[in-house]
Image (spheres, coloured by chain):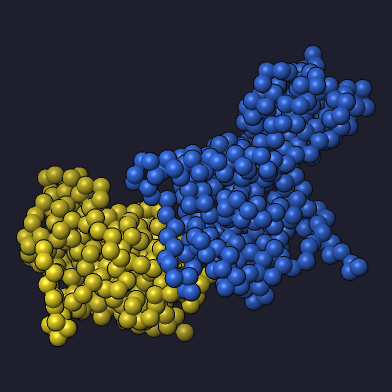
Amino acid sequence: MAEVEIREENKVHARPRLITDTVMHYCPGCSHGTVHNLIAEVIDEMGLEDKAVGISPVGCAVFAYNYIDVDWVEAAHGRACAVATAVKRLHPNNMVFTYQGDGDLTAIGAGETIHAAARGENIVTIFINNSIYGMTGGQMSPTTLLGMRTATTPAGRDAALNGFPYKIMDMLTHLDGATYLTRQSVHTPAAVRKCKKAISKAFENAMAGNGYSMVEVVASCNSGWKLSPVEANRWMEENVMPNYVMGDVKCSTLPK
Amino acid sequence: MAEKDVRLMKGNEVIAHAAVHCGCDGYFGYPITPQSEVMETLMELRPWESTGMVVLQAESEIASINMVYGGAATGKKIMTSSSSPGVSLMSEGLSYIAACELPCLVVNCQRGGPGLGTIQPSQGDYMQACKGGGHGDYHLIVLAPSSVQEMYDFVGLSFDIAFKHRNPVMLLADGAIGQMMEKVVFSEQKPRLTDEEVAEQQKAWAATGKGQRGKSNVVTSLYLNPEELEGLNNRLQEKYNRIKAEEARWEEFMCDDAEYVLVAFGSSARICSAVVEQAREEGIKLGLMRPITLWPFPEKPLADMAARGVKGFMSVEMNAGQMVEDVRLAVEGKAAVEHYGRTGGVIFTPDEVLEALKNNLIK
């Protein structure tokens, strides 16, 4: 393809400086790439490149460390918030964040997440909630909706057989240590802009020493959902988003 | 010369003092009998006000070992302590730590198993500590203290060895040494390294934030390309061979003219030194070989003893026969090797060990 010259005044977006040129392994249409870009932009704009330490999960985003050019520690499945707790306590001036999916965070990592939030650790969790285990091939996760078909709920999730889904962010609102909880999405340009503001606010909250923050991104997994990217976003708007209150769920300060 | 700082303390308490004195940066733990005094003592000492050491009570052993992983990934001196069932929960994390070649210290103050078992002392975790526990081909370096003084001295020593080889170290104690009070001589306070010193010393790998380094560091154990993962394994095996050559430690007691030799570590070795004295009074030429490192296992002294004509060895352990396998491997069939042990938290007496020696080996 011929090089196209884009005049500066016409440029609306460029690859963020802290996104490496490694080819991303994410499926076309996946939300991860968009959220990675936002994190890279926020770290750059806040001048946190030298202080940022990311904790990557087990799941599709395990390779986040190949894409965002800051220091990373890859955690065992579900343990990101415990790993982040230690990094932040030993380096209180660093910006420490975890990046986790719904399997890693709400299933195997629920305990570590709840306790890090309860203690009021000054870390940020970016929680990509696409209602499914992406990397292992589309199995049911705790956030899979009732009726939703997955590899382990081929007839649709049935409460009697598979249990009810749960919303970890709603549970976290009761914890004194969790001070900024917000639910976002990245399926439209407007949503992307809002999500970026939320990530900035969460990072500011952590750097101010005001306790635990979580940015939940209600996301699509078109491969896992067996839909095209456009259909997946539409299905998410019609079926997933009505189940969630979007926007800031909690903004508070740590109790004295 | 300044007067020595001598105290009377429990083994578990001195672990906490030793951690502070050797400049440890962080302790993450979870209560479990018989080692809870480690964290309790640290909370009394309040080292965050003196040296700046971080101390945190985690929500589980799984969280504690992953906090150790996170802290160690930033190049700092990090430790935890637990007892047998808790260490089982840590096994996954230990495999990750070994794979990422992170230096750290894990103290296991063993209790009887399997299962919930008992809170009484045991040496039933020898296999778990020395042969794996977690998944994959990895090794911890395992030190076995047999006195309260060694509980103290081995904390600093463990960190030195851990950082020398970038490998996790386990201090394999037991409930008896943890709970027992003995005289201990304290060392001088070593200062903790500053963040800048850590970032500089470990700049090749530690995730401290890019800072002035210019390039990012990633701590991970994921290698989807088989050749790459085999490369990591080959590097690890080379390192383990180096550790075997450099770090084996042991102590011999009356072995020079011995016809029979007891092999025992930790609490068992204390009992066995009494057995040696008793046997000598009866005219039996008995010696004691005490492995101080369990991994690497000190094979050479046993092989040498077998080669020079020691008639038999008895591995005396508070378990159903674990270290005895390593004794057999070292002796290579050149002499008889027997095992004597008690389980369940039962501690043998010198009399019963001597009796077993006569029945099993001397005959």
Looking at this view, name the residue that lies furthest to the top: B363
Chain A's shade in the image? Answer: yellow
Q: Quadrant of residue B304?
A: top right
Query: Observer-nearest residue: A28 or A89?
Result: A28
In the shown orientation, is residue A136 left or right of residue A3? right
Query: Observer-nearest residue: B85 or A1?
Result: A1
Q: Position of residue B111 (x, y in %)?
A: 62, 43
Q: Quadrant of the N terminus of chain B?
A: bottom right
Query: Observer-nearest residue: A49 or A184?
Result: A49
Q: Position of residue A211 (x, y in %)?
A: 42, 77
In the shown orientation, is residue B1 left or right of residue A176? right
Residue drawn at x 72%, y 26% is B303
Q: Position of residue A1 (x, y in %)?
A: 11, 63
Residue drawn at x 72%, y 38% is B291
Q: Quadrant of residue B210?
A: bottom left
Q: Quadrant of residue B326?
A: top right
Q: Is residue B94 visible?
A: no
Q: Quadrant of the C terminus of chain B?
A: top right
In the shown orientation, is residue B85 left or right of residue B287? left
Label total for image: 0
Residue drawn at x 44%, y 43% is B231
Residue drawn at x 83%, y 55% is B183
Looking at this view, name the residue that lies furthest to the front: A2
Q: Position of residue A39 (x, y in %)?
A: 30, 72
Query: Observer-nearest residue: A135 or B108?
Result: A135
Q: Is residue B278 visible?
A: yes
**Chain identifier for the blue-coloured part of the image:** B
